[in-house]
């Protein structure tokens, strides 16, 4: 009876229309991403309006460093969704529970890494050419505070990976909604009347994320009879840990190399001054609203693909790919058309300084028309990850960044002016698409999946089940 109860708690994507399933699963993810972006944006608006341009630049410039430091856990979070969704698709709930507890044992190693990140924040930001005009000190304070509270963010992401793998994309949204509300309230309190500046904005973020993480653990323990996340009782299986590393480590390496590459780009952006940095930061907050629906469908694609690979329904994997492409390309085109003429008005929400607004508009007008390329890249990479192929998405992202976006950004800035360096984004997306699409249609992933099926059958025959 317990298993019947838990299956109803999630969305079984091994039957039914791919379009309907992807929409049903991705809409809550989109709402969740909207909440997340909302409180990131509120951070920037409150800081930009009540603290100033330098504070707005400080909040944005350290983000790639934070992502690099925490990338292994982000990779493990994605691996959790893949591993649990495949076992959910195969209706092997005991194995799904083992994945959850094994991954949670890994989570607590984030503490020493957070200490390293705290100590390294200042020196790294100096290397990034953050101007020492007050921006550097504020960026250091912001990053150090975020690193101290990073366990809440990573814990929440792992909870979301568990729930999404089980077909539940609604509960993470509710928790994000709560986190967003708390973050906005605390932002206003800490920054405006208490005048804590960027420290207050960071403190509001880590408190709200920590509360959502703890509530997520409570929900998982109460909802899924076969999963029990207790800090003092987390069964650990080495085989599952190795699988999580096999899937998560390439994504972690991708995130590290990608984040370092983004830091190189930030160094170029930072070299043009605080106003250019602030405009770039604000524009990134705006284009994230186009990015969100694409990322939501992509995350749904990973869970959808994982479940259908677990159920051995490879035709449904291909049908889901086509549905995902249609959904993301249409959404990216519609949102870009709406946002393009509103770029100036949107930038003025963050800051009204003319140089800041001009930089943000230049970025948006050069990047928005090419978002269908990013949509295509997201979908193919998400399907490959759901299958269990993680090296190719890593290569497409890293190669697209290091061999295309970074060199072309410097070349464009030096030869055509700083505003035109933003065309480098599209150049990187083109190369990434070529790599992922080529592998999907001409690579050996189907043979590897078939070999995995045979290995699973052999384990079942010998009485093993993971």
Image: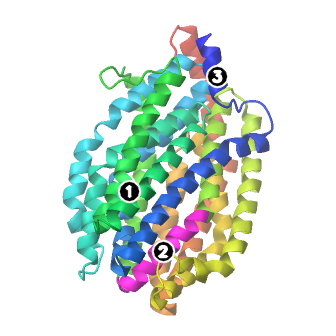
| Camera-side mark, 1 or 3 | 1
Is residue 287 on the magenta stretch?
yes
| Camera-side mark, 2 or 1 | 1
- Whether 182 is drawn above or below 266: the answer is above
Query: Residue 431, image x and y in percent?
Result: 59, 66
Secondary structure beneath label 1: helix
Residue labelled with disc 1: 186
Q: Is residue 166 left or right of residue 227?
A: right
- Whether 459 is drawn above or below 17: the answer is above
Label 2 vs 1, first from the N-terminus: 1
Marks 2 and 1, how far apart at CA = 21 Å
Q: Residue furthest front?
A: 193
For the residues bearing labels 1 and 3, Cβ distance under 8 angstroms:
no
Is residue 363 on the magenta stretch?
no
Residue labelled with disc 3: 7
- In front here: 142 or 78? 142
Q: Residue furthest left?
A: 119
Label 1 vs 3, first from the N-terminus: 3
Query: Residue 428, image x and y in percent?
Result: 55, 69
Query: Residue 443, image x and y in percent?
Result: 64, 46
Q: Can residue 376 be seen here?
A: yes
Secondary structure beneath label 3: helix
Residue depicted at 30% across the width and 69% down the height: 197
Residue depicted at 54% across the width and 52% down the height: 393
Give the residues in magenta.
271-289
- The mark found on residue 282 in the picture is 2
Q: Quadrant of the N terminus?
A: top right
Q: Residues within 10 Å of mark 1 (few under 14, many from 20)?
A: many
Q: Residues within 10 Å of mark 2 (few under 14, many from 20)?
A: many
Q: How many marks?
A: 3
Secondary structure beneath label 2: helix
Label 3 vs 2, first from the N-terminus: 3
């Amino acid at each position: 009876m317990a298993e019947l109860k838990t299956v109803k708690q999630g969305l079984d994507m091994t039957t039914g229309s791919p379009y309907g399933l992807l929409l049903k699963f991705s809409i809550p993810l989109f709402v969740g991403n909207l909440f997340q972006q909302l409180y990131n944006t509120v951070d920037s608006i409150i800081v930009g309006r009540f603290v100033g341009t330098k504070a707005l630049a400080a909040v944005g410039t350290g983000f790639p460093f934070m992502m690099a430091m925490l990338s292994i856990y982000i990779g493990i979070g994605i691996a959790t969704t893949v591993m649990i969704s495949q076992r959910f698709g195969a209706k092997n709930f005991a194995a799904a529970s083992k994945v959850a507890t094994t991954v949670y044992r890994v989570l607590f190693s984030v503490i020493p890494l957070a200490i390293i990140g705290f100590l390294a924040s200042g020196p790294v930001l100096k290397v990034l050419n953050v101007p020492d005009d007050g921006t550097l000190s504020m960026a250091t304070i912001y990053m150090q505070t975020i690193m101290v509270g990073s366990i809440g963010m990573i814990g929440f992401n792992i909870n979301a990976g568990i729930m999404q793998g089980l077909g539940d994309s609604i509960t993470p949204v509710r928790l994000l909604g709560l986190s967003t509300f708390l973050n906005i309230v605390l932002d206003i309190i800490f920054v405006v009347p208490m005048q804590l500046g960027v420290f207050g904005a960071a403190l509001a973020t880590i408190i709200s994320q920590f509360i959502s993480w703890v509530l997520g653990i409570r929900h998982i323990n109460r909802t899924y009879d076969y999963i029990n996340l207790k800090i003092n009782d987390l069964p650990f299986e080495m085989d599952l840990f190795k699988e999580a590393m096999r899937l998560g480590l390439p994504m972690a390496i991708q995130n590290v190399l990608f984040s370092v590459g983004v830091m190189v780009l930030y160094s170029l952006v930072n070299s043009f001054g605080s106003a250019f940095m602030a405009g770039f930061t604000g524009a990134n907050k705006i284009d994230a609203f186009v990015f969100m629906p694409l990322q939501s469908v992509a995350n749904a694609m990973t869970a959808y693909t994982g479940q259908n690979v677990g159920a051995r329904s490879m035709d449904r994997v291909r049908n889901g790919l086509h549905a995902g492409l249609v959904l993301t390309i249409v959404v990216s085109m519609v949102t870009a058309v709406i946002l393009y003429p509103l770029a100036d008005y949107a930038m003025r929400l963050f800051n009204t300084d003319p140089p800041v607004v001009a930089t943000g508009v230049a970025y948006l007008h050069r990047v928005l028309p090419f978002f269908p390329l990013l949509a295509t890249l997201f979908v193919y990479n998400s399907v490959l990850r759901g299958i269990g192929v993680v090296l190719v998405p890593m290569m497409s992202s890293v190669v697209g960044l290091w061999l295309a976006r970074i060199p072309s950004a410097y070349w464009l800035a030096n030869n055509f002016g700083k505003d035109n360096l933003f065309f480098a984004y599209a150049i990187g997306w083109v190369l990434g698409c070529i790599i992922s699409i080529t592998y999907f249609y001409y690579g050996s992933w189907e043979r590897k999946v078939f070999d995995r099926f045979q290995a699973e059958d052999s384990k079942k025959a010998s009485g093993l089940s993971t």
